[in-house]
Image (spheres, grey):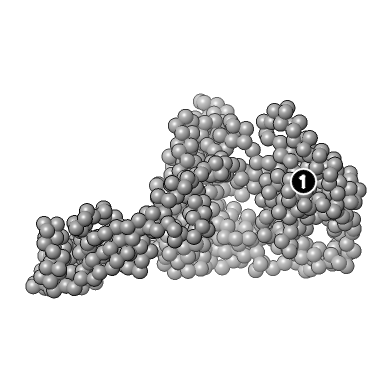
């Protein structure tokens, strides 16, 4: 399918352009046309290039996540802003810096860590245990091999190696913890009163004032840009299929793929792991081997679980007595696999060296592989044949639609007629999306793109889901425009009056605060303003109190004896409160439960670890040559 170009040239101008292109190639050589250039990347981190496909995949992934999380509040235009694009790219650069640091410092994700992570994924578990059959079925549904998926997991875990190591080495002292707890549980004695809302002496607003306000605040009175799109939709589930495959066809497929329906041999395994550091010295290797040999000599089926809980350094299986569940060939690393499938049922191995360290393996049970009869898998074969036919039909129709809409870039009509698919139309929608397909972030992004909105071309094929795609074309475009003054006049007038009241309130609050700071008593100031004082003693940070008031109460400095600290607080609702802090007391640490102390200690360690990681990344950035290609964002 031709996706890389857009047919935008018609008539004699295209002849001139093409002529110039031919001349350029004849002058500079065909090789210069096909050679890649240095600017094909979005960013270059040291010698590693972040290509445009990887960057766009990340943008699409984050856009989709934001759409799912924010629902109707999602605004796709945020992803068109340069600062958003740079923030996403910065995250990818940080990841690459961490990966390069892993290489420089000899850090890697062990096979055991990767296996434990995969085994912990709920989708691959049955009754809390890893289930190889579920794992294989999921891989098949995603069209992935174990190697591809394991590499994806390894790459994901690799970016966490350094942050995890830093966090694990970060500690919080008792003094730091006590200091923070004192602040956290600090108590303050407060007095405050709310200023009465002043009455306006003059409610008249002139036409000139209204006109001036409207012009100065016109951005507040804009109807957003809107579009509606025509679209042709291909839904695999709606496409007509040929008749269900015959038994003869199914049996032929069963015979040719019979190996698929053999349940592979599975072995129930427990192990004890003795780690060997990645850069271990000969002495360390000997010590690890000696320890493993001692355990292997002592181990027997009766106390294996106890030994695993006591000595194994595989934290994932240690608490389970070393239980790894039922394993098939190829699930573990090569050394472990070879030893396991050479053992007899009930046997405990001698130490087996792998990249993770020395394993003592106990083969607890064996389930032999066996073939499933045709009758048992017939429905599966029918489903697979139907799915394959549906996929083939969908790919054929979607491919033809893509080619047709590319060859006829200014209309969906030819594709609609050729494929007998109706042209549908959405209602008008903004950059925040609309109903139906217009709610999809990919459709929104395409509808407001330069190629579709400005140039008037069909979009490319937009994948909305499994076997579901559309091509769109602008139907109607309504530019952003200011609402007429007559329509918003009442609102403008009210906002002018509100602004007058706010200015009076602000002056009233500033004057009252000045009186307090000059030494006038709070009682006298409140009385003069016909306000009543509220007293609140030993207020804590989580008190039930309006947020602006509570925030300001804990921002004011400690008062001196007999000299309160004062502030005028904007309550963010059109009112002001005059606040006095009379006394501050540290929290009583004897009332903090031990579990709360430890929970807070962990949170502080995580926060310090995050800051330390950021400092490391900043240092890596400082010594790494980074080039960003703004034109590719």
**Quick one: which residue is furthest to the left in this view?**
201
Could you tell me residue 497's position as x and y percent? 16, 69
The quarter of the picture where residue 506 lies is bottom left
Q: How many marks?
A: 1
Q: Which residue is label 1 attached to?
A: 272
- The reply to whether residue 348 is visible in this rendering is yes
Using residue 209 as the reference point, say whether residue 78 is left or right of it. Answer: right
The one of 237 and 80 positioned closer to us in this rendering: 80
The one of 360 and 435 positioned closer to us in this rendering: 360
Using residue 73 as the reference point, say whether residue 194 is left or right of it. Answer: left
Could you tell me residue 584's position as x and y percent? 29, 57
Residue visible at 78% across and 62% down?
385
Could you tell me residue 469's position as x and y percent? 58, 60
- The reply to whether residue 60 is visible in this rendering is no
Could you tell me residue 384's position as x and y percent? 77, 62
Against 359, residue 592 (above or below) is: below
The one of 237 and 96 positioned closer to us in this rendering: 96
Against 278, residue 184 (above or below) is: below
Residue visible at 44% across and 58% down?
590
Question: Please, what secondary structure does the residue beneath circle 1 have?
Answer: strand
Residue visible at 76% across and 31% down?
286
The one of 178 and 468 positioned closer to us in this rendering: 178
The quarter of the picture where residue 224 lies is bottom left
Against 243, residue 97 (above or below) is: above
Q: Quadrant of the C terminus?
A: top left
Circle 1 Cα neighbour tier, 10 Å, few/some/many (<14 / 14–19 / ≥20)? many
Residue visible at 43% across and 39% down?
630
């Amino acid at each position: 399918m031709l996706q890389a170009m857009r047919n935008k040239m018609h008539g004699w101008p295209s002849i001139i352009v093409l002529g110039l292109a031919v001349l350029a190639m004849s002058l500079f050589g065909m090789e210069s046309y096909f050679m890649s250039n240095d600017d094909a990347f979005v960013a270059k981190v040291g010698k590693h290039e972040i290509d445009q496909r990887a960057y766009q995949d990340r943008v699409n992934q984050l856009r989709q996540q934001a759409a799912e999380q924010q629902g109707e509040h999602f605004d796709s235009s945020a992803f068109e802003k340069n600062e958003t694009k740079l923030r996403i790219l910065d995250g990818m650069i940080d990841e690459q810096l961490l990966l390069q640091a892993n290489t420089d410092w000899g850090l890697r994700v062990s096979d055991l860590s990767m296996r434990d992570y995969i085994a912990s994924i709920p989708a691959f578990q049955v009754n809390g245990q890893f289930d190889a059959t579920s794992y294989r079925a999921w891989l098949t549904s995603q069209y992935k091999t174990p190697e591809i998926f394991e590499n994806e997991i390894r790459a994901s875990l690799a970016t966490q190696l350094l942050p995890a190591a830093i966090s694990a080495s970060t500690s919080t002292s008792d003094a730091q913890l006590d200091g923070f707890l004192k602040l956290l549980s600090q108590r303050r004695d407060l007095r405050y009163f709310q200023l009465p809302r002043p009455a306006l002496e003059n409610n008249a607003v002139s036409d000139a004032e209204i006109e001036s306000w409207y012009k100065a605040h016109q951005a507040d009175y804009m109807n957003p840009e809107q579009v509606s799109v025509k679209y042709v939709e291909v839904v695999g589930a709606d496409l007509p299929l040929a008749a269900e495959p015959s038994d003869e066809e199914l049996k032929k497929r069963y015979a040719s793929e019979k190996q698929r329906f053999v349940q592979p041999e599975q072995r129930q395994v427990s192990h004890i792991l003795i780690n060997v550091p990645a850069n271990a010295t000969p002495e360390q290797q000997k010590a690890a081997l000696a320890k493993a040999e001692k355990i292997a000599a002592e181990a027997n089926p009766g106390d294996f679980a106890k030994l695993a809980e006591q000595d194994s350094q595989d934290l994932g299986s240690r608490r389970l007595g070393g239980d790894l569940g039922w394993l098939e060939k190829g699930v573990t690393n090569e050394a472990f696999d070879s030893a396991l499938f050479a053992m007899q049922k009930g046997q405990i191995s001698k130490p087996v060296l792998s990249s993770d360290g020395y394993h003592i393996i106990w083969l607890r049970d064996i389930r032999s592989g066996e073939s499933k009869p045709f009758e048992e898998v017939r429905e599966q074969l029918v489903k697979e044949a139907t799915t394959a036919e549906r996929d083939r039909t969908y790919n054929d129709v979607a491919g033809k639609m893509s080619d047709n809409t590319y060859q006829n870039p200014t209309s969906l009509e030819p594709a609609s007629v050729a494929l007998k698919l109706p042209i549908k139309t959405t209602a008008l929608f903004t950059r925040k999306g609309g109903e139906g397909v217009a709610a999809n972030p990919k459709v929104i992004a395409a509808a407001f793109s330069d190629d579709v909105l400005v140039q008037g071309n069909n979009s490319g094929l937009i994948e909305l889901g499994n076997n579901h795609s559309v091509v769109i074309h602008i139907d109607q475009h309504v530019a952003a425009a200011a609402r007429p003054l007559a329509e918003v006049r009442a609102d403008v007038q009210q906002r002018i009056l509100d602004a007058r009241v706010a200015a009076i309130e602000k002056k009233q609050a500033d004057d009252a605060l000045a009186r307090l700071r000059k030494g006038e008593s709070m009682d006298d100031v409140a009385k003069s303003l016909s306000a009543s004082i509220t007293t609140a003693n030993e207020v804590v940070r989580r008190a039930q109190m309006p947020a602006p008031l509570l925030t300001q109460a804990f921002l004011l400095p400690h008062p001196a004896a007999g000299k309160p600290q004062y502030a005028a607080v904007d309550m963010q609702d059109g009112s002001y409160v005059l606040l006095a802090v009379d006394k501050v007391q540290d929290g009583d640490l004897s009332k903090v439960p031990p579990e709360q102390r430890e929970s807070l200690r962990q949170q502080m360690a995580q926060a310090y670890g995050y800051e330390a990681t950021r400092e490391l990344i900043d240092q890596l950035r400082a010594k790494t040559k980074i080039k960003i290609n703004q034109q590719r964002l």
